[in-house]
Image (cartoon, grey):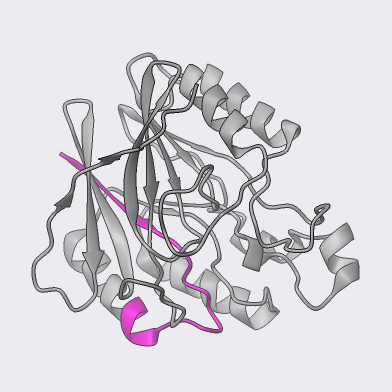
Amino acid sequence: MIRLFHVSDVHFGAEDRAAVAWFDRAVKAEKPDAIIMTGDLTMRARSREFEQASAWLEGLQRPTTVEVGNHDLPYFNPFARFLMPYHRYKQLERVIEQPLDIRGITVVPLKTTARFQMRFNWSKGFVGKKALQTSLGLLDAVPKGDLVFVAAHHPLIEAGTRSTGKTRHGREALEALAAAGVDAVLSGHVHDPFDVEEVVNGRTIRLVGAGTLSVRTRDNPPSFNEIRIQDGKFETIARRMGEADYTVTEPQVAAEPVG
């Protein structure tokens, strides 16, 4: 059995230190095959926050891939946001969007952040044509028979959580990813875990969201997901801090299928 830890929204600068330590202990004790981090490593994209994040990722000592979140773009510096939005992420270039070498599993990144949008709230998701084409190009090279996950920061469509992604072009992206054979889209942003089945043009795709390890919790305590994979199938376990026992999260079926 292959085990992945799916973690998101640590928000260094507003991290819950007890939650981060709890996650670290789980990694050290259980040694998952890989860690998928779906964005918002930092709170305000400050240099010291990235330094904390970099040290944390190095300390995990497990194969890790990281996707960019909206909080990881410069917040107080408009010049940097427009011209060098991902400059500070170079500190993490060894793990950002890196492929994981796990036989039978492929993880493909999808960028859902934007330095600028034609709406007031730039924190919400956006899938650009170039970003989608990049991901689809990577999917073309996936070995036949692999279980395929796409890692994004924002949920592509809403999953019934209190917070929202409101991802522009997310539904179109979901349709394209389903047609390309993706099994699940892993995301964060909303700070609550979820596992939803969506039927897209006759094909079922799972939407899986991780919670947060920050103090900015919503309806759940700090949490992360454990994904167990065996015989080409997977199950999601939402592991919440403070719960002695945890159970497999059965995927919910979306009320209104797409397509």
Q: Position of residue 77 (x, y in %)?
A: 84, 75
How many numbered marks are there? 0
Q: Position of residue 135 (x, y in %)?
A: 60, 31
Q: Is residue 23 left or right of residue 169?
A: left
Nearest the viewer among 246 and 61 is 246
Q: Quadrant of the N terminus?
A: top left
Q: Image quadrant of residue 109?
A: top right
Q: Position of residue 70 (x, y in %)?
A: 65, 61
Q: Is residue 160 left or right of residue 38?
A: left
Q: Position of residue 42 (x, y in %)?
A: 58, 73
Q: Which residues are magenta?
A: 1-20
Residue 9 falls inside the magenta stretch: yes
- Name which residue lies at 32% across and 85% down: 18
- Name which residue lies at 67% across and 73% down: 45
- Name which residue lies at 87% across and 70% down: 78
As drawn, which residue projects farthest toward the left? Answer: 245
